[in-house]
Image: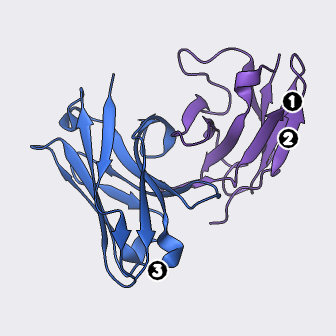
């Protein structure tokens, strides 16, 4: 069970869209539609913003969207705002009632 | 609004056992849902440690399974984590959290986290 692969950093200007990738294998991301995304501000606990690949919990703006193709999941943040600057983590069900996380991506709003 | 709060020693010596408790408020553990532990080493990503159901059913990260024990005390509305034979690599912020569904999907309620340092 290896960690999912995320780019260390991503950036965009206010109002723009940015997409963060999360690459796994045919045993996790590619096998199940149970990818989640978390937003984490410094010193705070993570907050789930996407689950089951593309579902948004109540209260999460529709600027956040998720998708998946093959072994890679993606999080798109549209209409970037200053408060979107944070660390983003992906996770995927990996079978046998286990879950694996990615290494995290630091999103900077320029 | 479900609230979770971690408690336990902030400093543990190498080779000893790390013990943490998560107290749940505004929701009875016995009513359902799995409850999990997730950790984050300083400056690194998240790692799922394991999840437990109120019945005591547990699922652990295979890489930690030999050292992890989770338990639940419904009378105190708490669940606990024990990690044995710790090393410096176990230094991390430890979070307790509740998944939206099943033992692993979309953790939506989190504690504030507690930093545990492994050092002599």
Asked whether the residues under marks 3 and 1 belong to the same chain, the reply is no
Neighbour class for label 3 at 10 Å: few (<14), some, many (≥20)? some
Marks 2 and 1 sit apart, C-alpha to C-alpha, by 8 Å
Position of residue A93 measured from the top left corner of the image (x, y, whole percent): 58, 49
Neighbour class for label 1 at 10 Å: few (<14), some, many (≥20)? some
Position of residue A40 measured from the top left corner of the image (x, y, whole percent): 61, 38
Residue at figure coordinates x 32%, y 28% from the top left: B2
Of A42 and B83, which appears nearest the observer?
A: A42
Query: Is residue B102 positioned above or below B83 on the image?
Result: above
Q: How is the image coloured?
A: by chain
Q: Disc 1 on helix, strand or loop?
A: strand
Circle 1 sits on which residue? A18
Nearer-N-terminus badge (2/1) = 2
Circle 3 sits on which residue? B87
Residue at figure coordinates x 39%, y 49% from the top left: B36
Q: Disc 2 on helix, strand or loop?
A: strand
Circle 2 sits on which residue? A10
| Image colour assigned to chain B | blue
Marks 3 and 2 sit apart, C-alpha to C-alpha, by 33 Å
Residue at figure coordinates x 67%, y 33% from the top left: A53
Q: In which quarter of the image is residue A67?
A: top right
């Amino acid at each position: 069970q290896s960690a999912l692969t995320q780019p260390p950093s991503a950036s965009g200007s206010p109002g723009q869209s940015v997409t963060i990738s999360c690459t796994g294998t045919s045993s996790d991301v590619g096998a199940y539609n149970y990818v989640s995304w978390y937003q984490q501000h410094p010193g705070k606990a993570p907050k789930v913003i996407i689950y089951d690949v593309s579902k948004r919990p109540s209260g999460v703006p529709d600027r956040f969207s998720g998708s998946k193709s093959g072994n890679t999941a993606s999080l798109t943040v549209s209409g970037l705002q200053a408060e979107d600057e944070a660390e983003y983590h992906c996770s995927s069900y990996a079978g046998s009632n286990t879950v694996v996380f990615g290494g995290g991506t630091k999103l900077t709003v320029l | 609004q479900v609230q979770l709060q971690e408690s336990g020693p902030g400093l543990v010596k190498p080779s000893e056992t790390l013990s943490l408790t998560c107290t749940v408020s505004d929701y009875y553990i016995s009513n359902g849902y799995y409850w999990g532990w997730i950790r984050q080493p300083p400056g690194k990503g998240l790692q799922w440690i394991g999840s437990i159901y109120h019945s005591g059913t547990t699922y652990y990260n295979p890489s930690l399974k030999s050292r992890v024990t989770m338990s639940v005390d419904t009378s105190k509305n708490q669940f606990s984590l024990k990690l044995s034979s710790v090393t410096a690599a176990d230094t991390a912020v430890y979070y307790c959290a509740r998944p939206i569904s099943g033992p692993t999907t979309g953790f939506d309620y989190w504690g504030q986290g507690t930093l545990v340092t492994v050092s002599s």
